[in-house]
Amino acid sequence: MTLLELPTRSPAYVERVDDIHDTDPIAKRLRDLGFVTGEPVRVVARAPWGADPILIQIGSTRFALRSAEARRVTVTMEVSHG
Amino acid sequence: MAEALLRVALVGNPNCGKTALFNQLTGARQKVANYAGVTVERKEGRFVAPSGRSVRLLDLPGAYSFESASPDERITRDVLQGRYPGETVPDLIVCVADATNLRLHLRFVLEVRRLGRPMVLALNMMDAARRRGIVIDVPGLEKRLGIPVVQTVAVRRDGVQALIEQVDQGIPLHSTTPASPADADLHAEVRGLLADTVLMPRASDAIDDAIDRWTLHPWFGPIILAAVMFLVFQAVYSLGKPLTDAIGDGFDSLSVLAGIWLPAGPLHGLVTDGLLSGLGTVLGFLPEILVLFLFILLLEESGYLPRAAFLLDRLMVSVGLSGRSFIPLLSSFACAIPGIMGTRSITDRRDRLVTILVAPLMTCSARLPVYALLIGAFIPMRRVWGLFNLQGLVLFALYLTGIIGAMAVGWVCKRMRRDRTENALLMELPSYRLPRLRDIAIGLWERCTIFLRRLTGVILALTVLMWFISTFPSPPAGATGAAIDYSIAGYLGRWIQPLFSPLGFNWQITLSLIPAFAARETAVATLATVYAVGSDADISALGHVLAHSVSLASALSLMVWFAFAPQCMSTLAVIRRETGSWRQVVIAFGYMFVVAYVAAFATYQIARYF
């Protein structure tokens, strides 16, 4: 499941961030911002008009991500230790 | 003890309070607000530590990481790595971290530590952390990081004592320069640090969650946003207008007094027609500007602006902008110059360029006197639906005109764009914060002094110049027309007027457009002066005079002209500096001139038939 499909306010954990092409700077930035395996994450809100962007909380930080960015993040609702 | 100057740099994630610390340490008044990317340039200040040692403090833009950097992050990286031209590597790095957000901020601390430079970690916002029940084992963190750790509350005067003492002591290179772990390991290290030294009862602030439930709600969110914006413009009118009238009355009495005390002659004319009518009219609009700023400051401090950017991102993307453009564009309502500089926090080059191009279409506060004058003169004071003020509504419509114009231009730019690779939003939303009275007061005071400096500088000089050319030369003996018709201003105005007569501008208005290019408010001062010189009676109420000598169609056309016209040289200069290209300046000037001319022409021609 990607972050985009995660229901609002359901706790989940980051599994991985995928590079959608070689040296994907957006994926790199996501990892820099803390989207790494095992990090707790949840969707806090979805914007009006097509639920894009979404507001997610990772750790105690909130980031607004567009669908294209959120789609790179694979999450799981099971506790994982990576 | 005369030691060499100690060079210290403040670094850290965006919005962790570096500038607040900087202000507290140096006594400076750099702008602080509650969103990421307030500081986009390096700022420098000095203070003397208790030991008598002088410290040169650098405030650097916030950064999440040294890699994948936006233009403002690059400055920070280059300064720290000694690659910034004219800047040597700092002797000491003060890495600032928000104590309520350590999971994110400690990663950057570790990245900075890799540089192997002397550094100290300042855990800022300790008051907020304590309130939320966050407990940090400071000695433990010091031991694990191998660097000194101090606690700070940047917004309190006594909140930086520990940091000053630490800086004064001098800091040795940390004993164990760690090997550089890979990126994933940085996160693992952060996790280890947090598990051992930080106790956090709840990941987020309960108050934030409660407020966001409403402000980011898919239906209520946009309604709240629209209501907030609308309220601001209504308030500018309802709160500002009575004060403006009071100032106007004050200048009327001054004018009468000056008429009694000064002998008739050029000096009398300069004081009453030039200074009191011209400058007085502009000064009268200070309350409106301050009310507008009060609201902008409140919004900036509260943390609401990034929420608005979140709600509007989709809409802005559809017109070729980005949610990140929202804050620079909103600051352009104050003045396009800080707005254009604020675009440095926009990571994507194309988004940034379009934002720069449309920023001057946002109605800046210098246009407010022009609008307020024309609205006051031509739009009746009336209640609409028993609730709204018609004058306030027209003002709102003018602001809206600029916004819609910006959207249209953005859309065209998007169509013309060849490079269609995707770009990211990745925008951090801060915690809400109660605006601090002191910050608001300082912000308003700064605005007030900037306005008065403009008034007594460029506007005063231009007004005197305009008075001079409208008074001299005196009409020849036996002249029958009004004296002003024989002055330089009369000739100059009539000479350029043919270009603007299709827009319904008379020669007085045409003339006022010239100094407006230096500072828009001067259009008002010029009109006041020209009409005051041109009439025998002492006229101080420029609005009444305009209402009698200019048609409604011309007034509407003039408002539309001001909404779009390429104006104020400083804005063009800052576009040149930020884009590094004259081509963008020509494009900006050209498109705005064409749009303004066409829109004003259409307005005049249509309005004439009603």
Image: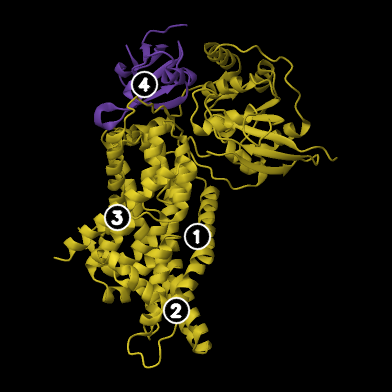
Chain colours: A purple, B yellow
Among numbered discs 1 and 3, the one appearing first in the sequence: 1
**Inter-mark Cα distance, 1 to 3:** 26 Å
Label at residue B495 = none
Whether labels 3 and 2 belong to a single chain: the reply is yes
User: Are the two marked residues, 4 and 3, in contact with CB atoms closer than 8 angstroms?
Assistant: no
Q: Chain of mark 1?
A: B
**Inter-mark Cα distance, 3 to 2:** 30 Å
Q: Is B377 situated above or below B72?
A: below
User: Are the two marked residues, 1 and 3, in contact with CB atoms closer than 8 angstroms?
Assistant: no
Point out the frontmost of discs 3 and 2. Answer: 3
The answer to which quarter of the image holds residue B219 is top left
Q: Chain of mark 2?
A: B
Q: Secondary structure at mark 1?
A: helix
Q: Residue furthest left?
A: B609
Tag 3: amino acid: Ala
Point out the frontmost of discs 1 and 3. Answer: 3
Point out the frontmost of discs 1 and 2. Answer: 2
Q: Chain of mark 4?
A: A
Q: Secondary structure at mark 3?
A: helix
Residue B362 appearing in the image: no
**Inter-mark Cα distance, 4 to 3:** 39 Å
Tag 1: amino acid: Phe
Q: Which residue is mark 4?
A: A69
Label at residue B596 = 3
Q: Which residue is mark 2?
A: B273
